[in-house]
């Protein structure tokens, strides 16, 4: 059984409610102002649903522009859509239904709820995990000690400089941070922090301290991603200028690749110097 996250439940309720409410309106009975308002409402609801969907699936452009395009296309096709809607209503009335609008509203709400609720409906072969759809946050597995030591090194204050904003909050989070088991071979370590007392600001950022190390003469870079004010992901990257880029990437995907010890890394701190 698939349970829904709180955010997805809210999206289901909002989307189904909007579609159901608009389906109850009979546009043929509206005056000019009401008709224009109705059309704008339909276009706006379509834009919001498409933009919301693009946030969780692969967008064509980006969520905002996808929504704007979808809303504009819907507005341009309103004559055709209203004609089809009228035929549906008349057909249902011809079948003896006294309240065809209520039937269409129910069908629209149920269909919208299903599209939002079903995980990765457009990607049946995707790597969906029930962890993404359960209430609360995934608990993860114990964070490897070498990863914890590397993150601590990235978050440590510079001996000759001011503390970075959010560093203290992130160090507090590290004490209870866990790793998310993705079930595959990856040098990207997703982190789980449950109920932190404080969040880092800015909430979304690539931590301005990186760590460089070498394996077999190849330079690698450790980066720390902060998501929603929490420790998000520790990643091993290969610089674009690395001459043996393909070989370096193949080494990263090997199960034999291991993280460096803290004494093997060189920290690189971002500064305001050009």
Image (spheres, grey):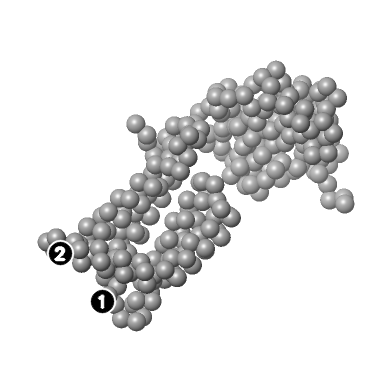
Left/right of residue 252 with respect to residue 203 in the rendered view: right
Q: Nearer the viewer, residue 216 or 138?
A: 216
Q: Is residue 57 above or below residue 74?
A: above
Could you say whether the residue bearing mark 1 is in a helix, strand or loop?
helix
Left/right of residue 12 with respect to residue 131 in the rendered view: left
Front disc: 2 or 1: 2
> Would you call the spot at circle 2 few (<14 residues within 10 Å), some (14-19), or many (20 or more)?
few
Q: Nearer the viewer, residue 203 or 223?
A: 223
Left/right of residue 110 with respect to residue 102 in the rendered view: right
Structural distance between the alpha carbons of marks 2 and 1: 19 Å
Name the residue that disc number 2 marks.
94
Q: Nearer the viewer, residue 126 or 274?
A: 126
Q: In terms of sequence position, does the residue under pointer 2 or pointer 1 come before the other? A: 1
> Would you call the spot at circle 1 few (<14 residues within 10 Å), some (14-19), or many (20 or more)?
few
**Residue 9 visible in the shown view:** no
Which residue is drawn at the image coordinates 15% and 64% (left, top)?
Answer: 94
Which residue is drawn at the image coordinates 35% and 46% (left, top)?
Answer: 114
Name the residue that disc number 1 marks.
29
Residue extending farthest to the left is: 96
Residue 199 is tagged as none
Rendering coords of residue 225 (x, y %):
66, 39
Which residue is drawn at the image coordinates 56% and 60% (left, top)?
Answer: 65
- Quarter of the image holding residue 155? top right
Rendering coords of residue 113 (x, y %):
35, 49
Rendering coords of residue 265 (x, y %):
81, 27
Residue extending farthest to the top is: 256
Rendering coords of residue 131 (x, y %):
47, 32
Q: Is residue 3 above or below residue 257?
A: below
Could you say whether the residue bearing mark 2 is in a helix, strand or loop?
helix
Which residue is drawn at the image coordinates 44% and 56% (left, top)?
Answer: 49
* Quadrant of the drawing holding the N terminus: top left
- Quarter of the image holding residue 97? bottom left
């Amino acid at each position: 059984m698939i349970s829904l996250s709180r955010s997805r439940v809210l999206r289901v309720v909002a989307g189904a409610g909007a579609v159901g409410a608009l389906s109850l309106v009979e546009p043929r009975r509206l005056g000019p102002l009401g008709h224009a308002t109705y059309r704008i409402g339909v276009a706006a609801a379509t834009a919001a649903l498409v933009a919301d969907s693009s946030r969780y699936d692969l967008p064509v452009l980006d969520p905002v522009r996808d929504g704007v395009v979808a809303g504009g296309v819907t507005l341009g096709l309103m004559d055709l859509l209203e004609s089809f809607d009228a035929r549906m209503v008349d057909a249902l009335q011809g079948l003896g239904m006294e309240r065809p609008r209520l039937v269409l509203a129910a069908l629209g709400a149920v269909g919208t709820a299903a599209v939002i609720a079903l995980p990765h409906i457009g990607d049946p072969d995707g790597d969906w995990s029930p962890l993404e759809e359960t209430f609360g946050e995934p608990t993860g597995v114990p964070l490897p000690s070498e990863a914890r030591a590397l993150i601590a090194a990235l978050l440590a204050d510079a001996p000759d400089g001011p503390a970075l904003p959010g560093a203290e909050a992130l160090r507090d989070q590290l004490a209870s941070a866990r790793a998310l088991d993705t079930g595959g071979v990856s040098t990207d370590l997703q982190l789980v922090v449950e109920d932190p007392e404080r969040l880092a600001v800015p909430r979304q950022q690539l931590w301005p301290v990186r760590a460089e190390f070498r394996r077999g003469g190849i330079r690698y870079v450790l980066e720390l991603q902060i998501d929603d004010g929490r420790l998000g992901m520790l990643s091993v990257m290969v610089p674009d200028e690395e001459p043996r880029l393909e070989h370096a990437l193949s080494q990263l995907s090997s199960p034999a690749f291991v993280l460096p010890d803290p004494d093997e890394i060189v920290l690189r701190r971002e500064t305001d110097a050009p």
